[in-house]
Image (cartoon, grey):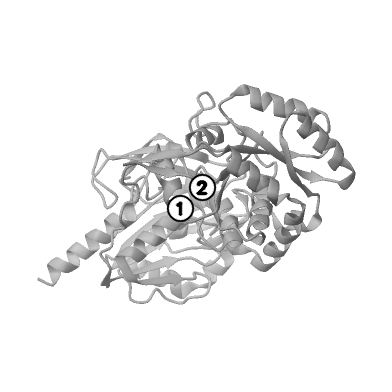
Amino acid sequence: MGMEVTVPRLVVASYKGRNGKTTVTLALTYALIKAGLRVSMFKVGPDYIDPSYHSVIVNAPSRNLDYVLMGDKVITRFYRYSLNSDIAIIEGVSGLYDSFDGISEVGSTAQIAKLLRAPVILVINGERINRTVRAIIRGLRDFDRDVKIVGAIITNTTQRQVDKLRIAVEGEGLEFLGYVPRSDDLENAMQYRHLGLIHAEEINKQHLIKVFNDASKFIDVNKVVKVAREYSEPLDVGGDVIPEMPNIVSDELRVGILSGRVFTFYYPETIERVQSLTRNVRFIDPEVDQGLGDIDLLLIGGGFPEVYGEALEKNRALRADVRRFIDSGKHLYAECGGLMYLTNSIIYNNEEYEMVGAIDAVTVMHRRPVWYGYARARVIRDSIIGNAGLVLMGHEFHYSSLILHGNYDFVIKYERGAGINGFDGFQINNAYAHYLHIHPDTYDVVSKIMRGILKSKAQLSM
């Protein structure tokens, strides 16, 4: 017998990126929490940064719903992670109908809204606009009548504009659910950098909560709950949708994860799967901690090593320990920022910072992205990550490129993406690093490596 999603839900969308979707999502969620509701949060697409803000507000992980990487698994994921909540808030990506290829609807916020049978609320930037709001609403609604646009929230507006904008919204038959007034505090709390917002791990969280407590006062919670309940349709999920976590908990396996402010790009499922396989997990701050400790596997996610280059360079002890760890044949898996950290140095803003030096290359930061979006790569030689022929779907977000000094046999070749001149994947002893970000629901490389280590340990003890 199939399961059914009944939780009320809302998709927060807009007609373009950087229009205040995250701001509205956080203000709206804070208002719901203040009203005593349990909120689950989601983000459309492959994003680490917006969900980090969600997590601060709900004090729980936010989950990605990414059709390009996960296909119909997005429905079972939504069911699983919204199960014990009173309402689910799903933040969209880019503009409502913007998609993976710019032609079909695949990967769009609209596609997720239809798959989840969820009503949509529009975020409209209220700066220098009034009656044109009606044309925007009408165009977005008429473009695809299967997308249920039910309400709107105005951002970046002044008190004297609100009434005009409310009349425009209601004139198109949508519920006016509130507004977020223009605010210096809010602007300072939501600072941008080259990959988008600054990650929530790098900012003052108490200040963020205060800012969104203030912003939430202008949201009409009763109307929000009303439209979510009224327009969310029951959704049939299918059969057994909650797979067991691979629970082989072993005290034998010790895992280190580089974290702190520098390396923040980890999907929550990656950390959860590590913790389902071992109780021995150590989070290591590369700015402060002087050594890795006694570990079998080191994970280095993406992040901003270039921004914290000076502090990373100063921590010579840790850099030397990472190099020794790799040279001794221990296991390491790194993505993007982690790969950059393993090179000889990073050049950023005309400064060069010394890094680990395990990969004989210099990382150079550019003003424009080298690749920004989905990527598809084929494994071309057997390696830690998988055997030749395996196709990896993931995403690349980097403004850096490598100047190679050493000769390397790359592990993967891109069919879509950039990597390093179309190739990627360094394997040095049992250490593996590439630019590609992979979600564990697409391909669970970390669990695969951990199982391999456990198997080797078992064989050695026989």
**Is residue 158 among the parts visible in the rendering?**
yes
The spot of residue 406 in percent (x, y) is: 37, 51
Residue 224 appears left or right of 329: right
Residue shown at 65% from the left, 53% from the top: 26
- Against 150, residue 339 (above or below) is below
Query: Which quarter of the figure is the N terminus placed in?
Result: top left
Q: Do the residues labelled 2 and 1 touch (CB within 8 Å)?
A: yes
- Against 232, residue 290 (above or below) is below
Identify the image quadrant of residue 198. Answer: bottom right
In-front residue for pair 235/425:
235
**Is residue 437 among the parts visible in the rendering?**
no
Give the label on residue 411, or none.
Answer: none
Disc 2 on helix, strand or loop? Answer: loop
Q: Which residue lies furthest to the right in this view?
A: 160
Q: Name the residue under label 1.
A: 83
Alpha carbon separation for disc pair 2 and 1 = 7 Å
Q: Name the residue under label 2.
A: 7
The spot of residue 296 in percent (x, y) is: 30, 69
Q: What residue type is labelled 2?
A: Val
Q: What residue type is labelled 1?
A: Leu
Residue 199 appears left or right of 182: left
The answer to which of marks 2 and 1 sits earlier in the sequence is: 2
The spot of residue 187 in percent (x, y) is: 75, 53
Residue shown at 40% from the left, 72% from the top: 282
Residue 412 appears left or right of 284: left
In-front residue for pair 411/320:
411
Residue shown at 19% from the left, 68% from the top: 457
Disc 1 on helix, strand or loop? Answer: loop
